[in-house]
Image: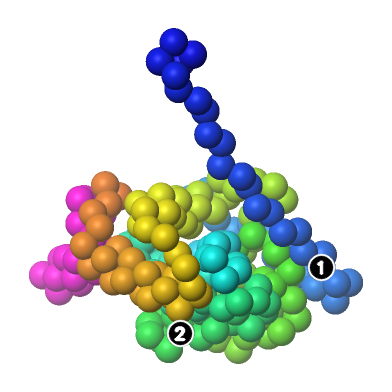
Amino acid sequence: MSQLGLKVRQRLAYKLTTKRKHSDAVADNLLNQNFNPAGPNQVWAGDVTYLKTAEGWMYLAIVMDLFSRRIIGWHIDKRMTTALVSAAMMKAYNTRQPPKGLVFHSDRGSQYTSKRYRKLLSGYGIRASMGDVGACWDNAVVERFFGSLKHDWIFKVAQPTREHMEKDVVAYMKYYNLHRLHTANEDRSPIKYEIYYQGSQAG
């Protein structure tokens, strides 16, 4: 590398730690890295990521149906709060209207362990599942989504404003759900895989 004049550039890892209150509760890990449910609306997963703009940080919360890898709910804001993850879940629930007993998997961040968020899940009849501390592979599918969002899309253009970032995220969500192929979906996009599944069940 020295002879070729190459230098290694390392990405900086931005990690904001959050401290749970005593009233917060941690759920058991119901997935144990089993990311392939047999059908839609059986297991959802979510997380929050950081997106940098010239105006400052933004925070994106998503909810993914692990069956098809489809993003069914998301919300972006300047603050990383329980309201952020709650808005993403409410969008997902209103979009899908899942049966009671669905599992939602996340990390142990204070937003997800908060009393307010637990009450939201309980009202929807959703069972909480949480990965172990520091085990990013316990939510690997969501982490891969964030990686593709950033490296295949966000990082390729300048992000001068929060408004620009939000529009770029909207564009990627449409591309990802409608067109991005997944080997786990037999080389179909999330929406096309769900349509294929529905057709196979009807047949």
Q: Nearer the viewer, residue 7 or 42?
A: 7
Q: Residue at x 42, y 54 (%)?
A: 155
Q: Give the secondary structure at mark 2.
A: helix
Q: Residue at x 50, y 53 (%)?
A: 143
Find residue 194 and report its horizontal and vertical position in percent: 24, 68
Name the magenta segment's main secondary structure: helix
What residue type is disc 1 on?
A: Arg
Find residue 137 and report its horizontal and vertical position in percent: 56, 45
Find residue 127 and report its horizontal and vertical position in percent: 59, 73
Where is mark 1, residue-wise?
20
Q: Which residues are magenta?
A: 185-203
Q: Is residue 147 above or below residue 58?
A: above
Q: Nearer the viewer, residue 127 or 5?
A: 5
Please say whether residue 155 is one of the residues in the magenta stretch: no
Say how the picture is coloured: rainbow
Find residue 169 and report its horizontal and vertical position in percent: 40, 70
- In this image, 165 relative to 133: left or right? left
Q: Which class describes the residues within 10 Å of circle 2: few (<14), some (14-19), or many (20+)? A: some
Where is mark 2, residue-wise?
91
Q: Residue at x 23, y 67 (%)?
A: 178
Mark 2 or mark 1: name the one nearer the start of the chain: 1
Q: Which class describes the residues within 10 Å of circle 1: few (<14), some (14-19), or many (20+)? A: some
- In this image, 49 relative to 173: left or right? right
Picture quarter with the C terminus: bottom left
